[in-house]
Amino acid sequence: MQAVGARAARWLVLLAAFVCAACGLVYELELVALGSYLLGDSVTQASVVLSVMVFAMGIGSLLAKRFTTRPATSFALVESALALVGGFSVLALYSCFVWLGHYQWVLVGVATLLGVLIGAEIPLLMTLLQRIRRQDAGRAVADLFAADYVGALVGGLAFPFLLLPALGQAGGALVTGAVNAVAGAVVVLWLFREESSSRTRVLLWSLCGAVLLLLALAAGLTGFFERSARQALYGTPVRYTHQSRYQEVVLTGPGPGPGPDGTDDAAGRVPPPRGADGAGQGAPDPARSRSAAELRLYLGGRLAVCGADEPLRQAALVQPAMTGPRSRVLILGGGDGLAARQALLHPDVHRVTVVEVDPVVLGLARTDPVLSRLNGGSLADPRVRTVTADAFEWLRTAPATRRPYDVIVADLPDPALDQSRKLYTEEFYGLVTRMLAPGGRVVVHAGSVAEADYWQADAGLRAVGLRTVEYSIPSGPDDCGSPADWGLILAARSTPQLGLPADTPEPLGLDPAALRLAATLAGTRRPLRPPLPSTLLHPR
C-alpha cells in the first residue's frame, strides 16, 4: 500500500466500492427481470427479490463483523463467492425452471445468498478505508456510501441499456461476475498484499483465476445451454429466436414445405396478399397446412400463436365485430397478422391499421414462410398500415380529429401479465371509445371467463358507457396447452347483436347458433357481485 500512497489507495478502495455496488444492483435486476419473464407477475417478483435481498444484506453486515481482523482476505473471498453466485445465478435459476419445474423457492435462496454476500462488503470496505488513514467515522461513511450509491446508479442504467440488449440475461450476469472478481482480487489483494502470507496470496490469486476461468467457460457454453433449454422447454424444434427490446420471440415447428412447383420455398416466399376482389381463397396445399398447424409462436415465454387453434380463435375474435359498417378497422396488438387476415376477408374493408409494440413480431409475420402462410400475407396487403407503438400511448396521442374506426379489435397479451394490465383498464377503454365511430363495435380478448380478469375487463368496458355481450369458445386441441376457453367480449354504445356477417367466408368452424350458445354459457359464469373495473391507480 505504501508504494501507491495513502491518497491513491483510498481512491482505489472507493473505486472497488463503486464497482461492487454496480455489480450488486445488476444481480438484483437480473433476478427481478428473470422472475418477471418466467412467472409474469413483475410486482410480486420485484417485491420478493428486493425485500429478501435487503433483509439478507443486514444479516451479511452482522456476519462481516467476525472477519474485520483480516478485511482484505475476507473481502477477496466474499467477492469471489459473489462472482460465482451472481454470475451463475441466471443459468442456475433458468435450469431449475426448465428441468426441475421449481423456481420460486430457488429464487428466494439465491436472493438470500446474494444479499448476505453484498451486505458483507460495506463493513469490510469501511475497515480497509480506516486502515489506510484514520478519519472521522461520519466522513468515512459519507465517502463510502457516495461511491456505493453512484455505483448503484451506473449498474441500474447499464443493465437495461447495455447488458441486457447486448449480452442477454445469462451473458450479462457472467460478465458482471467477472468484473466483481477482478474488483475484489486485483484491487484489494494487490493493494493490501502485506496482510497475508505469500502462500495465502497465491491461494487467493488462484481462486480468483479459477472463478474467472469458470465464468469464461460458462460464457462460451451459453449458446449450447440456451438451445438445450429451449428444446426442453418448448419440446419442438426451435426455428427462430430473438431477444427484442420487449420480450424473447421464439418460433417453433417444422420449416416450410415444398411450394406448388415442387421447390423448397424456405427462402421466404410468401403467398400473394389477398386483394380486394377476394383472390387467393383457393384450397390450401396439404403440406403447407400441416406446417402451419404445427407452428407455435412464443412471446416472452408464453404461447401467443398455436397454428392448430388460430383460424378458429381469430374468426371468433374478429368476425362477430364485422357485422355492420366496417370500412375502417383498428387492430391493437395482432402483430402476427392473423386478426388482419380475418378483417381482409371482407372486400368492403378499405383500411386496416395494426398497432403493435414489437417490430420483431411484425417483421417475423412478414418474412417467416410458415407464419405468413397462416396470416395469408395480410401485412403485405395494400389496405393494411402497420404502426410500431404501444397501444395505450398511440391511442392517447392519436389526433382527436382522426377519422374514427368502425371496428376496433383488442388482440392484446393476457391481462394476467403485469405489463399488460394498463391495456385492460377503464382509462384504456375510454381512449378506445374515443376512436370508435357511431355504430362501431369493439371486441376484446380478455382471457378465460373463469378468471376474475375477464369480468374486470367487462366492467371496464361498461364503465366507459359501452354495452357488452360476453361469449367464449373452447380452446381447441390439447397440444396447444391453451386454457379451457377463450373469453371474448363484444361491446358497442348500444347492446350489440352477437352473430356472424351474412357474407362471412366459409368454413370458419363457427355458426350463429354456436355463438348464441357460447354467450349463454359465458353468462352462467358471471360473478354474483360485479367486480370493480381496473384502473391505472388501482389495478385489480
Image: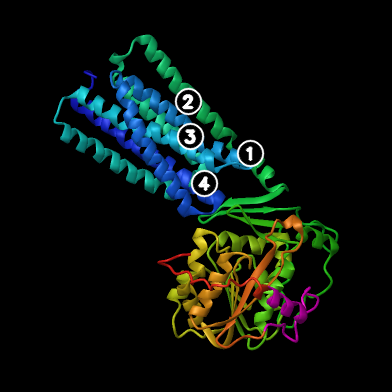
Is there a contact, CB below 8 Å, between mark 4 and mark 3?
A: no
Residue 316 in picture, x, y percent from top left: 70, 74
Which quadrant would residue 129 be assigned to in this image? top left
Left or right of 301 in this view: 119: left
The span from disc 4 to disc 1 (Cα, nearest Å) is 16 Å
Q: Which mark is residue 211?
A: 2
Q: Amino acid at mark 1?
A: Leu
> What is the magenta range?
498-521
Rendering coords of residue 148 (x, y %): 29, 39
Residue bearing mark 1: 100
Q: Quadrant of residue 180?
A: top left
Q: Nearer the viewer, mark 4 or mark 3?
A: 4
Q: Secondary structure at mark 2?
A: helix
Residue at 75%, 57% (x, y): give it: 478
Q: Report, in whole angstroms, how far the alpha carbon at label 3 lies from the one at label 1.
A: 20 Å
| Contact (Cβ within 8 Å) of mark 2 with mark 3 | no
Quarter residue 181 falls in: top left
Q: Is residue 302 visible?
A: yes
Q: How far apart are the alpha carbons under marks 2 and 1? A: 26 Å
Q: Which mark sits nearer the N-terminus, 3 or 1? A: 3
Query: What's the amino acid at mark 3?
Result: Gly
Q: Amino acid at mark 2?
A: Val
Name the residue beneath numbered marker 3. Answer: 87
Residue 378 is situated, as x and y percent measured from the top left of the image, at: 67, 71
Task: Kindly identify the residue that appears in the image at 63 percent across and 38 percent down.
Answer: 100
Closer to the chain start, of discs 4 and 3, is 4
**Do callouts 4 and 2 mark residues in contact (Cβ within 8 Å)?**
no
Q: Which of the two labelled residues, at mark 4 and mark 2, occupies the earlier sequence position?
A: 4
Task: Decide if residue 265 is in sight here.
Answer: no
Q: Residues within 10 Å of mark 4 (few under 14, many from 20)?
A: some
